Amino acid sequence: MNRESPSRALPIPRPRRRPATTRAAVFRRYRKPLALALLVLGMASFLSALAPEQHAEQRVLTLSVPRPAGAELRASDLVYRTVAGDLEDPGLLTEVEQAVGERLAVGLPAGALLSRQMLIGEHLLTGTAPGTVAVPIRLSDPATVQLLHPGQLVDIVLSSGDGFEREIRSETIGRRLPVLWVPATAQEGSLGLVPSAASPADGMVVLAANSSLADVLSGAVTRGKVSAVLVN
């Protein structure tokens, strides 16, 4: 029995695409790829805006360990650190030689950047009025020192008399004087601006005052009890 062979399907010719001859035709033909490309570019721009901005790096001098106010800086206390960005502070210390042997005007934690304004010396009175001097003064109650910090304003009160033979009299000999420096802890034996044999228990602090008050303040402890009153 003969079987007829199945007829082979004839190929259907693909329609020929006419070449795009105008801008509108080109846009219609490639609008999907063009839209996809614009979407990719938009996402790239968005992600770039969210990414952290790249800055130049700067090498700065920092503390390797925490140091209290009045501490003399040693080479072992210092370490270089690279930070991102350009720190526009002309007072920043960049060389170990600039800091070794200097004393801190304030206590600083490990990792703190060092600047000239943080050191005791000619910068301690930076920004003060002409004629201002740094006056060491000894408070009669050493415990008061623990309440003070650099930048605090105080009135200095002198009390004289014993209440028996002499009437007790109190007078304010200095008003709104900024505290420049206080000892950090009872274990710290060197005060920086005063002899290293002194200790914080002696109640020594350093105030900024007009030079006309220097003699009155520095010699007050010999005339009676000297107290500091905190003011705003």
Image (tube, grey):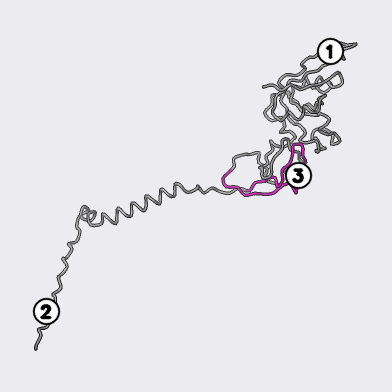
**What is the CA distance from the residue labelled 2 to the residue labelled 3?**
101 Å
First along the sequence among labels 2 and 3: 2
First along the sequence among labels 3 and 1: 3
In this image, 59 relative to 47: left or right? right
In this image, 125 relative to 54: left or right? right
Q: Quarter of the image holding residue 202?
A: top right
| Residue 100 tag number | 3
Image quadrant holding the C terminus, namely top right
Q: Which residue is outermost to the front?
A: 1
Q: Residue at x 41, y 48 (%)?
A: 46
- Residue 58 location (% of width, % of height): 60, 47
- In the image, which residues are magenta? 59-86
| Residue 7 tag number | 2
In this image, 1 relative to 164: left or right? left
Inspect the image, locate mark 2, and give the three-letter code of the amino acid beneath it.
Ser
SS class of the residue under badge 3? loop
What number of labels is visible? Answer: 3
